[in-house]
Amino acid sequence: MKLSYIIREGIIGIKRSRMPFMISVFSVTIALLVVGLGVMAVDNGLQFIGEFQADYDLEIFVGNEATSNQKHNLAAIIKDYPGIIRMDYLSKEDAAALYNAEFGEDVLSLLDDNPLPSSFRITFEEDYRTAAYIQKFMQNMNALGGVDEVIFKKDLFNRVQGIMQFVYTFATVTLFIIILATVFLTANNLRLMILARYEFIETVRLLGASDFMVKAPFFLEGGILGFLGASLSVLLIAAAEYAIKYYVHIDLPVKILDHPEVILGLILFGVSLSSLGVLKAVRKMLRFVA
Amino acid sequence: MIRFEKVFLRYDTGISLRNLNFSIERGEFLYLYGDSGSGKSSILKMIYMDLFPNAGSVNVLDFDSSHIKRGDIAKIRQKIGMVFQNFYLLSDRDIFSNIALPLELKGIKADEVRRRVTLKADELGIRSRLSHFPHELSAGEQQRVALARSVVDSPEILLADEPIAHLDLTAAAEVVKYLWKINESGTTVIFATHNEKLLKNDPARTLSIVSGEVVKDRAV
């Protein structure tokens, strides 16, 4: 079976060029470590900034004189409003309990009557969470009967949104540059690894190997290389997170092991980067080997 | 089997082949005789489609150089055995693996590979060397390994480019004897050499090349 030749030659190739292979695995590990740490830092950064944002975007206070019917009406309108992902109703009793929990005082013991209004706390979907949309929503709500006041902390909201946007853009550009550098450096390294195998490529071509038979073992070798490099980088990132938790005492909100999609992404990136990088290097070399 | 028609080849360095017209029939033993740089290796390279003529055509096993595809080159080479002056042995694998390579590339089963490699190693007296590496062998032994590899898949054509150039007299005689033996089994052998004595000791059809031209095509 030619397949057995490809698999055997791919594995033998690794054994025979252990040192260049290890160096290439190491270079892929370092490259993906940088990429992976970048992704995790951005995720954690955004999570950290996001914590400055309230649990909800906006609060609609209901007038004390609003009838039960008006409240139901209001709830139904809010519920059907496009872009709202969550709506929580806080009754006057809930508001008093919250006051008690936050300030440690029972509002009913200070005053004879509970002055705190009932309210709706609204959270918008990510795509609708813009100051303009929320302000439009406020206008619509203010026009409804039973609404006493709509509170939206626009300045804080805008500020946090702005910072998050900046971090996101900056991180995307930086990550893009890192990935480009990674691709370039890894491809260069793989080219050197393949260059060291010129003798083999030239000989097997002379012996009648088709281009496919020359490339296939290297493609496999590249895949194994990328898988090992990427797996190693995931382990190192997890180890770094562990070290931060136990030595710096910061429990990061976003951890790589909780995100299989990031792990899978890094492994796929590593495997495709290496196997395609190797393939490209072999193809280039084949141009010089008749 | 092999046909050169009005073949011209120019190198940047100026060395060239001029107006080559000859045919080689199945089962022939042919010497390509000429000094270094006369164009013998270029002719061999054109036979295994490593070089292509600037004008004219080379036809090998019904494949024509003027419109051959890259994939077909591999097919031709699978039917051609080659022995070079510098052996082309892979230094990072043992002798068994070196000889077995053409068979493995074809996907032949391991048992059959072992049988054929052992048979050829026996014929060439290198069986005891199968687990060694090329650098552990003498030049004569390395050439016998290269010879074993070139014939292990029973090629239709065997190209030998100065195969005895670096060998002592005894080793050279053994290689030549073996090439004749291969030829007797039906393989076409093309032997490039600058050794005039060889032509006298083992006469065969000889194409004499001088400065890229066939100046004499002498039958036995």
Image (tube, helix red, strand yellow):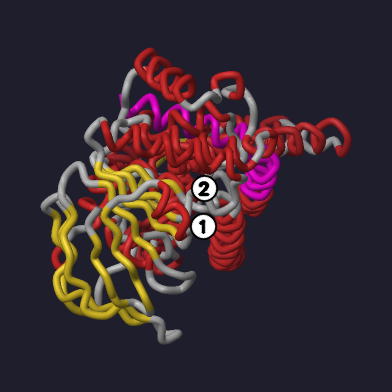
Label 2 neighbourhood size at 10 Å, few (<14), some (14-19), many (20+)?
some
Q: Please determine whether, in this image, residue B149 is positioned above or below residue A170.
A: above
Residue at x 38%, y 29% (from the top left corner): B104
Q: Please determine whether, in this image, residue B196 is positioned above or below residue B36.
A: above
**Percent coordinates x, y for residue A262 in the rendering:** 52, 40
Q: Please identify the quarter of the rendering in which residue A153 is found.
A: bottom right
Residue A68 in view in this figure: yes
Q: Judge whether residue A15 is colored magenta.
A: yes
Q: Chain of mark 2?
A: B
**Percent coordinates x, y for residue B207 in the rendering:** 29, 64
Establish whether labels 2 and 1 are both on one chain: no
Q: Judge whether residue A176 is colored magenta.
A: no
Q: Which mark is residue B49?
A: none
Q: Which residue is mark 1?
A: A151
Q: Which residue is mark 2?
A: B88
Identify the magenta region: A1-29
Amino acid at pointer 1 = Ile
- From the viewer's perspective, tell me whether residue B207 is left or right of residue A45: left
Mark 2 or 1: the one toward you: 2
Q: Chain of mark 1?
A: A
Label 1 neighbourhood size at 10 Å, few (<14), some (14-19), many (20+)?
few
Find the residue positioned furthest to the top: B111
Distance from disc 2 to disc 1, alpha carbons, whole Å, reads 82 Å
Along the viewing direction, whichever of A276 and B134 lies nearer the viewer: B134
Along the viewing direction, whichever of B208 and B96 lies nearer the viewer: B208
Q: Please identify the quarter of the rendering in which residue A247 is found.
A: top right
